[in-house]
Image (cartoon, grey):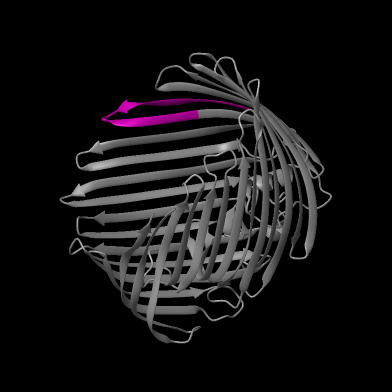
Amino acid sequence: MQLTMDGDASVGYNASFGNQIAGTHNFDFGGSANLKGFYFDPKFLSFQVSPYYNLSRLNSNYRSDFDSTGVTASAQLFSGSHTPGSFSYSRDYNREGEFGIPDLGSYKTHGQGQSFGLGWGLTYPGLPSFDIGYNFGSGSSEVLGTTATGNNDFRTLTLGTGYQVHGFLLTASYLNNHLSEALPEATDFAKLVNFDTHQDTIQGNVGHRLPFNGNFQTHLSRTNFSSDFGGSSAGETFNAVTTSATMTPLTHLTVGTNIGYTDNLAALLLETVLPTAPGVAPQPGRSSTSLDVSGIATYAVTQQFNLQGWVDHRRQNIFGFDTTSDFYSGGANYSRPMLSGMVGLYAGVSHYTSDSRNTGQTGTTESVSYSRRVGVWSTNASFHYSRNQESAIASYTQSGRGYGVNVTRMVGIWRWNMSATGNENALDSVTHSGTFSQNYNSSISGRRLSFTGTYAHSNGNAVQTGTGLITTPVPTPVIPSSLLILYGGTSYSAGGSIHPTERLNISASYTHTDYQTTAASITSENSVKQGNFVADYYYRQMHFVAGYNYLYQGIGTGGAKPANFQSLFVGVTRHFNLFGIQ
């Protein structure tokens, strides 16, 4: 048996105050430990346990605003054998969380949770492999600046098997998942929306190598799920099958084909685009099917120049509307050194016909990139544009454009970097289907000093999930309009750090985000501001820290007062190697 244990112990002063908490002045103790080892042999039983207590910005690496306490543990049994097993457990209190806003950042949540996991496998030579996993957990979180507290509960069972016979690789799996959540509405945080989803998915896959460095694969799946979203129930079952093959019959030529069919296209698209969205289901009794047959060929004329061709035929029925479409596309890639730099070009043309339109549409796709070093400047830039390109639903086309620029140069001992990116995409002639984002960043850094600043702006449509808003290009015939959330806002930040000595680091940052969300004629105006100042000094195994943290969060339309949280802290942490036992 072997055991080792190390950890950190800290002590310090922490003062916290705000409009939603009682002011406190504490002389705090905290710390963390890491116990790991094995019994008899690492391949027989190995384990690790990591408890932590009272960790905050005073003494934690992840810079939490709250005094978090908890434990994580894991164990591996019979690893390296034919019957490996595993175990995991976590429990945390007073944790900090985030709810993401596309391309803008996030707002803060505060809560607790726990999870448990167990897995086992069988891997005997000459026999099918088998593995089983079971996970469950629960948690709760409060959105700072609101009166809303959400909760969640999940259970997941997975089974899997695989076998190879006569060159065929056969795999199959089963997933049973239950997710129950009560989430604050992203546009009215005074209300909670209840999600409850049950899902069963069976999958099978057959693969085999083909001549000419080829590969063949068939995938089948059947999914059944029931969902209750805000009191509106739905149940769906959908089957899908895809078959694909690729070959390289000539040295420079690669060809491939793909055939796919589903008897519930709307549900399949939602599962693909929004895998974490609870409660999102097509409206009952409205069917949608799709058959897709496509082929692709790529020919490398030279190392720098290659050609591609694509053809696609689809037959879809979306909620009673039959659509047949054909898509033909050809393009060329070219890259080479030019003007002491490197240039990359792509040009493509496509033709799209659909019986839902009176005339065919011709589309184009272009992109260009260039990078070059000019004296002390290192530069690269790119731009892409597409028009009337095929979308996931046959009766729609989509267009988009985007750019990226990055410039770096040395100014004496300073490294100065500037970058900008922007992207815009939308389904043609579909209201509220577009997303737009732009980001700008500039930084300058030296051996002892650095500064950075950012600006971001974005808007678009999204669906609410347990981790935040997720953008989706799927139009409202598939996503019920009651689930669609429009968002938009801006964010900017500034920060800097100074290293007067190798052991001393002083840093400060400020972030300001203003955004709004709109759904069902309800608009929520939201604002998040956060500032940090931290000074760290390291001496041998001692870590001295002092700082200040500020958080302002105004969320929702329910009239709740914005949360205002501030803290001052100063303390010391020491690392210990506690023991090693054999």
Asked which quadrant contains residue 335, the reply is top left
Asked which quadrant contains residue 91, the reply is bottom right
Magenta range: 328-347
The image shows residue 178, relative to residue 190, as above or below, that is above
Residue 79 lies left or right of residue 351; in this view the side is: left
Q: Which residue is drawn at 38% across and 50% down?
A: 420
Q: Is residue 313 visible?
A: no
Identity of the residue furthest to the right in this view = 285
Most common SS among magenta residues: strand
Residue 156 lies left or right of residue 496; in this view the side is: right
Residue 139 lies left or right of residue 342; in this view the side is: right
Q: Where is residue 238 in the image (x, y as percent from the top left)?
A: 77, 43
Confirm whether the magenta stretch covers residue 276: no
Please state, as top left, top right, bottom left or bottom right, where the C terminus lies in the image. Answer: bottom left
Q: Where is residue 235 in the image (x, y as percent from the top left)?
A: 80, 53
Depth check: give the residue in front, 507 or 343.
Answer: 507
Q: Residue at x 27, y 60 (%)?
A: 451
Q: Where is residue 182 in the image (x, y as percent from the top left)?
A: 67, 67
The image shows residue 216, relative to residue 65, as above or below, that is above
